[in-house]
Image (cartoon, rainbow, N blue to C red):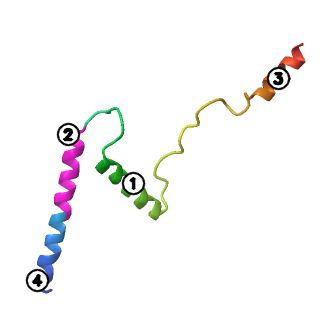
Amino acid sequence: MDVDKMLAELRMEREQIEEAILTLERLARGRGRRRGRPPAWLKEAQQAIAEEVASRGESGAPAPKRRGRPVGSGKAKQAAATNEAG
């Protein structure tokens, strides 16, 4: 194998390792939940991970929780219940 090619590959790996170290240092510094909007670098990192998982076809995160009233507790059902009682 060509020595110049090996050096170029090692330099690329070193850059990737340095980026990973920086990311981990940021995560270690930012321990705990913080109020407000997440920093831009964290949001970008989460999007990149989500895109990578989606490209693999894996199910990354569970479906978000549904908020609000349950499906069968709407006004129509309540009105029907009051008509039957009265």
Amino acid type assigned to the residue bearing label 2 in the image: Arg
Q: Position of residue 9 (x, y in %)?
A: 17, 75
Q: Give the Cα distance between marks 2 and 4.
A: 38 Å
Q: Earlier in the sequence, mark 2 or mark 1?
A: 2
- The location of residue 39, given as percent across then percent down, is 30, 44
* Inter-mark Cα distance, 2 to 3: 54 Å
- The mark nearer the N terminus, 1 or 3, is 1
Q: Disc 1 designates what residue?
A: 47
Q: Earlier in the sequence, mark 4 or mark 3?
A: 4
The span from disc 1 to disc 3 (Cα, nearest Å) is: 45 Å
Q: Which mark is residue 79?
A: 3
Instruction: Work out whether 51 lies above or below 33.
Output: below
Magenta-tinted stretch = 16-30
Q: Main secondary structure of the magenta part?
A: helix
The residue identified by callout 2 is 29
Residue drawn 17% across and 64% down?
15
Residue 69: quarter of image: top right
Judged left or right of residue 7, residue 41 is right
Foreground mark, 2 or 3?
A: 3
Mark 1: secondary structure: helix
C-beta proximity under 8 Å, tags 1 and 3: no
Estimate the x, y position of residue 74 in percent, counting from the top left: 74, 29
Left-right relation of 33 to 64: left
Picture quarter with the N terminus: bottom left
